[in-house]
Image (cartoon, rainbow, N blue to C red):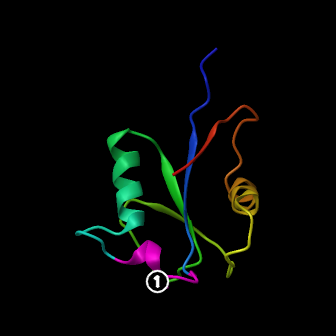
C-alpha cells in the first residue's frame, strides 16, 4: 500500500509584533513565503499557503484564506482550519514549511 502524499502548509500570518508583514517583505530578492514556495516546488511537494493576507496572490499556488489571526494563535488552529477545508486520508502526513 502506497503512503499518502504529505499536505504541506505554509503558514503566513500578516501580523507580527516585531516586523509587520514580515512574511511578505523581500529579503535578498524573495519574501519568506516565496522562499517556502520555492523549496516545496524544488522538492516536488504539493503545498498551500494559509494566510490572512487578503492581498496575497501567487500564480499556481493554492491559497487558503483565513480570518484575521493573532500571534498567540496556536499552530494547531491553523492546521485544523486547513484540514477542515482540505481533508485528506487519516494517515496523511502534514508538513509545516
23 magenta-colored: yes
Looking at the picture, does residue 93 appear above or below residue 10? above
Which residue is label 1 attached to?
55
Residue shown at the point (47%, 45%) measured from the top left: 46
Q: Which residue is farthest top?
A: 1
Magenta part of the protein: which range?
A: 15-25
- In percent of width and height, residue 61 lies at 43, 60
Q: Nearer the viewer, residue 47 or 28?
A: 28
- In percent of width and height, residue 84 lies at 75, 57
- In percent of width and height, residue 43 lies at 37, 38
Side of 42 relative to 79 (left or right): left
Q: Nearer the viewer, residue 3 or 28?
A: 28
50 magenta-colored: no
Q: Secondary structure at mark 1?
A: loop
Magenta stretch mostly in which secondary structure? Answer: loop
Q: Which residue is farthest front?
A: 18
The quadrant holding residue 88 is top right
Q: Nearer the viewer, residue 6 or 15?
A: 15
Residue shown at the point (67%, 53%) measured from the top left: 86
Side of 72 relative to 38 (left or right): right
Q: Quadrant of the N terminus?
A: top right
Residue shown at the point (45%, 77%) measured from the top left: 22
Amino acid at each position: 500500500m502506497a503512503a499518502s502524499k504529505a499536505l504541506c502548509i505554509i503558514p503566513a500570518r500578516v501580523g507580527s509584533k516585531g516586523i509587520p508583514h514580515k512574511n511578505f517583505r523581500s529579503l535578498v530578492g524573495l519574501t519568506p513565503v516565496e522562499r517556502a514556495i520555492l523549496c516545496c516546488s524544488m522538492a516536488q511537494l504539493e503545498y498551500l499557503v494559509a494566510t490572512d493576507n487578503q492581498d496575497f496572490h501567487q500564480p499556481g499556488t493554492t491559497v487558503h484564506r483565513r480570518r484575521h489571526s493573532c500571534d498567540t494563535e496556536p499552530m494547531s488552529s491553523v492546521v485544523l482550519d486547513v484540514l477542515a477545508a482540505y481533508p485528506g486520508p487519516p494517515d496523511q502526513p502534514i508538513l509545516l514549511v
